[in-house]
Each structure stands twice: as structure tokens, then as C-alpha cells.
Image: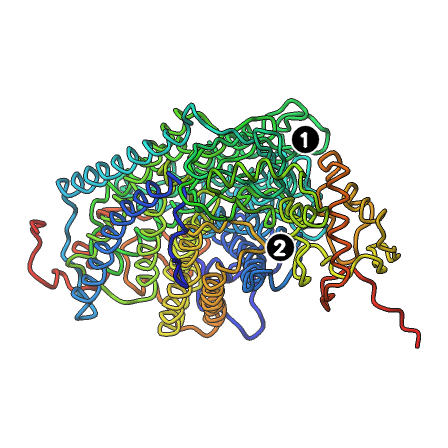
Amino acid sequence: MQSQLPIYPEQASNFAPHVDSLMLFITAICVFFATAVTVAIVIFFFKFHRKQPNDVGVPIEGDSRLEAAWMIIPLILAMAMFSWGAVVYVDYRHAPQDTLDVYVIGKQWMWKAQQPNGLKEINELHVPVDRNIRLILASEDVIHDFFVPAFRVKMDVVPGHYNTMWFRPTKPGRYHFFCSQYCGTNHAIMGGWVTVMEPSDYAAWLSGSSGGSANPLVAGEKLFAERACITCHVADGTGRAPSLNGLYGAQVLLADGSTVSADEAYLRESLLQPNAKIVAGYQPLMPTFQGQLTEEQILALTAYIKSLQSQPVPAKGSGIAPPTGKK
Amino acid sequence: MSNTPLTTLPGHKPPHEDYLNATYGIRSWLLTTDHKRIALLWLGSVTFFFFIGGIFATMIRIHLLTPTGALVTPETYNKLFTMHGVAMIFFFLIPSIPAVLGNFLIPLMIGAKDLAFPKINLLSWYIYMIGGCFVLYSFGTGGLDTGWTFYTPLSSIYSNSAVTPAVIGIFINGFSSILTGLNFIVTIHTMRAPGMTWFRLPLFAWAHYATSLVMILGTPVVAITLLLAGLERMFHLGFFNPALGGDPILFQHLFWFYSHPAVYIMVLPAMGVISEIIPTFARKPIFGYSFIAGSSIAIAVIGFLVWAHHMFVTGESTYAALTFSFLSYLVAIPSAVKVFNWTSTLYKGSISWDTPMLYALGFIGLFVIGGLTGLFLACLGLDIHIHDTYFVVAHFHYIMVGGAVMGYVGGIHFWWPKITGRLYPEMLSRFAAVTLFVGFNLTFFPQFILGYLGMPRRYHTYPPEFQVLNVLSTAGASILALGYLLPMIYLTWSMRYGKVAGKNPWPATGLEWTTDSPPPTENFHVTPEVTWEPYDYLNRPDLGLAGTPSPAPAHGDD
């Protein structure tokens, strides 16, 4: 359990305990030296406080044995830190042979991941627990960085380079991942969640996600979560994208001042060409799903969004135009 | 010696002629070649940029009070932290101590009439002002949102902000740095007074000598690098953009080849200031003079060989990472040597609690934390977690603000009587020093924890679990701001109303304290001759102190 004010994130990968031990080791040494210096300063500060206004100190020019001691001892400790850190790093930079490879592509300002069977995700990454996972990282524009604090690992995603990183998740759960290399306007919201699943759940998720569900409404609801629509289109209107409650059939106020009726064509266009019509007050952040959704899936999503028509519309954070003031 | 001023105001006849009242009028300042007047021009302009950078910092901290961002849009936030960094690093921290205190003091400390090239010295300031105008133009016309690091291809292709004028401004400003460094090196080599041997040089001069080496050798590299990024942006010449056949990692190598040593440009002069303050206010020679002097040179040299520790997670080769991690640990040793020697100097001293000493001790405390947390970042295995998080932000603020700015403000207090001839109000200034120290720690210590928890830097919005520490940091920043405003106010006040200081109020042993306060234009009425060792209080009857040390005689055996 995390307390109200934790000092380290959850440990959820093979690297996390090593990095934390390393942290403790270096912290212990540094606290020792910082305390020693501080205590010495404070003691001298009071003990040798000037008694008479024209007092002078005892001239001590130096001591070469002391100088040698405080060069050699810190050097030995520094080499210990270096060596331990090097061991962890070399391990991190050399992935084992038996990895499950997932492609991750960063672009301003979203993450796309592709599972070995071709399944694509956006701002989400599903991986099985206790399996060595290797991420193959590529960027479509500027430098990004894939960072999972709970795993204690990160790697830059550099255009023109393929970087790789690996880890073995040790605990099922959902963990934040961030972009940690500044990449422009929406750098801070270029993140998402890694979901670590039991192997059986992961297998079921892999096969279940290709759209086999019979009921389009249920399948749509599932897709809405899986494709991370739900992370922006939050029902209560607090997300980065408008709430979709009550949307179907309503008038939507657009950024250019016009309004549009939210019918099936509009929903479909917004899925495939999200930048064609921007809802007033929102950024053009939504990635296109052109080529990523089958017709079946588009239908399922549309069915689900239509079913939200009866849900309560939040006061703020909905794209629906206010009723015109005629009385 | 002539005591007749060239011009006098009606009814106001100055008692002594000094560099401040030797001539009057705006031309006498803007066309001066007196290193002391040029130092005051610098003081004004770096304070201006500190103010600009400070306003950006204030807005940043207010914005981060809430997870969703309390103040500005994402675009504006990104511009704020970029412009904060550019203003503070290139236009405040790098010139602050060298151009203000170094300019004023180096000729005085070595017994010279001026720097070796007085006109070039003035040119340096004009170049800085021209560079500054370009950067202000960039800030005013669209701002700058690349981060102060200007990483490509974001800066060279993707950014929609005013990158080109900013890059030109920093390019121009580089020449100011190079010329100042050149001036210091030549001056220290050729203009020392009779008897001022290399090992009688004040450690402040040693630190500036080391700094000047870095300025001359490093600055051209960053100037060229930024120029290349600018050319890529303006003319689509492919240096760093992979779409044009370039390599973005190349930019980082070139950029950090200067910008890591630049950290030492900022902190070495501060170490020089501390090395002056501590013996003065402990009234004894500094412990291990040659080790402190040598460690400055060692830092300057090794500091050039550690740049790629900024790049452990860029995908650089494992061997490169191992090499740079190793070298980064080596550079920690000379820094540690300085800290141990300063601390030992206090032993059996006659320690006063005057303001400059409070700043010096505050500097040691903050520099120790800043330096030690560098060991965390140099550690390869740990860096893969804390790289690009708030841990880094906290670390470099401890070095640059806790270190360099504490040193600068402490130095300003120490030499204020020499610069202005006046003393500042002592109790108020002690209060300000303590406020600065407390405010600083409250602001930046929580950021170490934030970083380890995984909050990346340069985020305009953050997950709610990080809010408590961010609020703490902002609260600390408001105390810190008070700590900066107080000295600005009472120092200005003291220029007119402060007590007259006299030649040597502390008293200190340096040559600069043997001349008038403020000094005459030619610095010394007669060329001084140095017959004493540095920081020697025993053989200086002119200081008017007790001729023998207060406790038992020295053996240096304990």
C-alpha cells in the first residue's frame, strides 16, 4: 500500500528492486558525508565563534595526509557506486533472448503500440506478467522518451534510430507511463497506462480484441476502453476531449463557430478524420483511426456512442451547443 | 594625487575622487574603459535578466499549484520554462560572477590598474547587450518553447516559436564570454604586481583563471552548434534532422560538450568567492591553498570529459556510457576536496557571523547536497530511472542557485563596501541570508522526492498524486522570492544611506582592501608590492588585529 506521501513508486519490474537498492546505497553514503560536513560546520561555527573583535584564528596551512585521505576514501566509494550502477545498466542495455517484442511508436503527442499479433493500441500497453518484454521504439517526429516509473526504466525514442528497452513485469496492475523527453506543446499529456496481466488474461485479451463479440453495443463499449477513447472522452466532462453523453442527435458547437448535427456520419468522420471538425474549446489531439478500425468496429463504437444518448450530460466538458436564447 | 573632480555638482563637493565621481554623465559610463564602471554596467544588466528569469520562475511555480495547471496554457507554460532557462543560464548565471565581481576585482586583487584590454572589456558588455536584445526580441515576439537545451529536431524543425532570433542572440552573446575569458587570462598572466606570485594569487583569481579556460575552449562549440541548428531551421540544411540526413544525437554531443562545462563556468567563480569569504571571516589562512587552487584546474579539465552523462538513455553505446559515468565520478573528487578544505579552515578560526560568512556556509551546505545528488545521476543504473525527472531539476538548481547564486549574492555583500564605499544593514542582511537558505531548501528539496516518484520535468500538468510536493515547493519559492527581494532593496538603500565603510571593514587580507573604498579610477595611488602570503593574518600589522592568535600557538598537529 502506498501512503499519503510515498517516497518511492511501486516496484513492478525486475529492475525496480535493484534500482531502489542502488538508491539506498548511494543515499546512505551521501547522507553520511552531508551530515558529517554539516555537523562539523555547525560545531565549528559555534565553538570557534569570535570572542574579541580583534581576535584572529590559529593559522593552519594544511595537512597533506588529510588531503590524501579525503581524496582516496571518496574515490573508493565513488568507484563502488560506479561499479554497481554499471552492473545494473549493462543488464538493462542487453535484453535476454526470449523476449516478447512490442513495437512502440511515439509521435506528437501520443503513443502507438503494436502487439506481436498485430493488435494495435493507443496510449495503452498490455503485457503479460513475468515475461521478458522488449520494446522497440521509434519516433515519427521529434525525440520522445518512454518512461515507466513503476518499472524504473526509460529510453529515449529518437527519430531515425531504433532504440530498445526491456523489463520483466513482476506484478499485475495498471501503471502510469510518461513521455519524459520534452517534445513540444502537449508533452505533459503524452502518456498512458501499462496494463500488466496474468498470462491467461493476456491471451484472452489478445484474441478477444479483434472484434469477435456478437453484441455490437457490448463490443463497442469494450473497444471504447481498449482503444483508450475513455481516457480522453471522460463521461463527467473532465477529460481532454468532450464527454459523449447525450451527444447523439444533438447540435455540436465547433471551433470555427458553426454547429453540426451529431449523426452517424459525423461520428464516423470524427473517428477517421478527427481533425476535420474540432469541437469548440478543445485541442486537435485525437489520433486518426483510419485503417485501424474495421467497419464492424466502427459500427460497434457508433452503437455504443448512440447508447450514451440517455446518459446525463455534464454541465461543463460536453461539446453540445447551448440551447439558443429564443423564448 | 589629484583630489580635484573634473566636474562637480553645485553645492556637492565630493571629499575624495574615486571611480564613481571621477567623471559624470551618461557618456562617461557608456564609453568608460574602467573595469570597475564596466562591472557596474554588468551588475545592472545581469540583475535585469535575473528579474526577467525570476518572473518566469514565479509564474511556473504558481502554475504548478494544481495538477491541471493553475495559470497558463500548455504553450505558454512551455515558453515560461524555456525563457526562464535561457535568461537565467546564458544571461544571468554565466556572466554574473565573472563579469560583475571578476571584472571589478581581478585587477584590484593582483595590483593592476585595469584589465589587459580595457576596450575589449567594454566591447564584451556591448556584445552581451546586443545578444540580449535579440533574445528579448524572441521573448517578445512569440516566445521560445524549445527548452533551454534546444534539442533538435524539435528546435530546428517542429517548434513554432521564435527560435531563430534566440539562437542568434545566444550565438552573439558567446563572443562576450570568450572575450571576457581572454581578458582575464592575459591579465592574470601579465599584470600581477611585484611580489604577487602565482601561489600568492587569491583563490578567487585561480577560480577565474580556470573559468576563463572553459569559456575560451567551450563557448565556440556551443556557438557553432546553435548556429547549425539555426541554419537547419532557416535553410533546411540537414545537420540534425534525420529527414534531411542528419542525426539528432549529434546535436546533443555538441551541445553538452559546452553546456556541461558551462555548469563549471557558473559554479567555479562561486567557489572562488567562497574561498575568499571563509578565510576572511575565520581570520586564518585557507586550509590547503594549493589543493583548492589545483582542484579548480582539475574541475575545469575533467569537466570537459563528462558531457555524455547527459545522454545515458539516448541509446548511446554501453561502452560510451561506462566511460562517461566513470569520468563523472572522477570530477566529484576535486569538488569534495574543496568542501573538506573549506570546512577544515573553520577549525580553530575566529569565526564571525557576518552576512558574507552566512552565505558562504549556506553555499557549502547547498553545494554538498547539489554535488552529492550528482553522484546519483552519474550512476548508470540509477539514471535510467531519474533521468529527465524532477530529481534532475532539483539537482541542478542546488548547484546553480544554491551554489552559484548563493556565491554571487554572498560575494556582492562581501565586496559591497569596496564597490560602493558603504555598508549594508547587517541584521537585515543576516535575516535575508537565512530566509534565502530556508526558502531555497523548501523549494527544491521536495523536487528530489517528486523526481524519484517519477514526475518528469517540463510538465504543465501532472497526476494528482504529485500535488502535495508541488504545493510545498511553491510555498518555499515564495519565501525564496522574499530572500531575493530583500537584498535588492536594502543594497540599493545602502548606496546612499549606508554607513561609510572605510578601506577595510572586515578586515580582509587581499590587495583590493588596501586601497580606498570606493577605489580611485587608477585603483592604487602607488603600485602595491606584495610581501605577504595569501590570507596571512599574523604578519599584517596594517590590519590592526591582535598580533598573535587568540588560543594556543599553532602546530597544525590536530
**Residue A242 lies in what quarter of the image?**
bottom right
Label 2: element kind: helix
Provide residue B77's location: percent of width, then percent of height. 62, 55
- Please state if A298 lies on the left or on the right of A141 as rendered: right
Q: Which amino acid type is shown beneath numbered disc 1?
A: Leu
Q: Which mark is residue B358?
A: none
Tell me the quarter of the image containing the N terminus of chain B.
Answer: bottom left
- How many residues crowd around disc 1 within 10 Å: few (fewer than 14), some, or many (20 or more)? some
Label 1: element kind: helix
- Label 2 lies in what chain? B
- How many residues crowd around disc 2 within 10 Å: few (fewer than 14), some, or many (20 or more)? many
Q: Which mark is residue B77?
A: 2
Q: Residue furthest bottom?
A: A327
Judging depth in this view, the residue of B229 and A215 nearest the camera is: A215
**Residue B196 lies in what quarter of the image?**
top left
Q: Tell which circle, 1 or 2, labels the residue nearer the N-terminal end.
A: 2
- Please state if A300 lies on the left or on the right of A167 as rendered: right
The residue depicted at 55 percent of the width and 43 percent of the height is A179
The residue depicted at 28 percent of the width and 46 percent of the height is B529
Task: Identify whether B491 is placed above or below A16.
Answer: below
Provide residue B339's location: percent of width, then percent of height. 27, 49
Provide residue B212's location: percent of width, then percent of height. 43, 38
Tag 1 residue: B231
The residue depicted at 31 percent of the width and 42 percent of the height is A22
Question: Separation of disc 1 and disc 2 at Cα?
Answer: 27 Å
- Residues at discs 1 and 2 in contact (Cβ within 8 Å): no
For the residues carrying marks 1 and 2, which lies nearer the camera in this image? 2
Judging depth in this view, the residue of B272 and A259 nearest the camera is: A259
Q: Which amino acid type is shown beneath numbered disc 2?
A: Tyr
Q: Is residue A30 visible?
A: yes
- Label 1 lies in what chain? B
